[in-house]
Amino acid sequence: MEIELSPKSISLLADALAPRVAVIIMQKMNEDPMKEEWVDTRTAARILGIKPNTLRKNIDKYTHVKSGDKRQGHLLFLRSELINAFAK
């Protein structure tokens, strides 16, 4: 079975997978992905100057991971990326 995707769909899929793939690659390289400072949603929102709910609605714009289980986990964001996004 073959599935055809439009260039836009491929781009959206790649953007959605990239943060997860990056963490997996770092783990496989025996590097700790948590060396970079990761911050919780409230702190990330403060860095960006927005409300936490606004951040959650726009979550795909920022590299993030979910710690814990799928329902009760906490979102973590890369501090350096948030600072760069705020500066733009």
Image: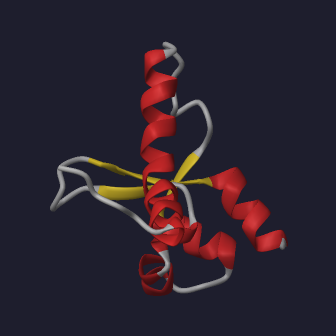
Question: x, y (%) of residue 8?
Answer: 52, 71
Compared with 42, 32 (above or below) is above
Instruction: Tell which of 41 and 2 is nearer to you.
Output: 2
Q: Is residue 42 visible?
A: no
**In the rendered image, is residue 74 in sight?**
yes
Quarter of the image for the C terminus: give it.
Answer: bottom right
Indicate the position of residue 59 as horizontal and vertical percent values: 47, 71
Q: Residue at x 47, y 35 (%)?
A: 23
**9 or 1: which is nearer to us?**
1
Residue 21 sits in which quadrant? top left
User: How far across and down, in percent of the image, does residue 54 sit?
Assistant: 49, 86
Q: Position of residue 2 (x, y in %)?
A: 25, 52
Q: Is the residue 47 above or below the residue 71 in the image? A: below
Residue at the (42%, 30%) spot, across then down: 24
Q: Is residue 66 above or below residue 30?
A: below
What residue lies at 47% left-to-right and 80% top-to-bottom?
A: 52
Q: Nearer the viewer, residue 30 or 6?
A: 6
Residue farthest to the top? 30
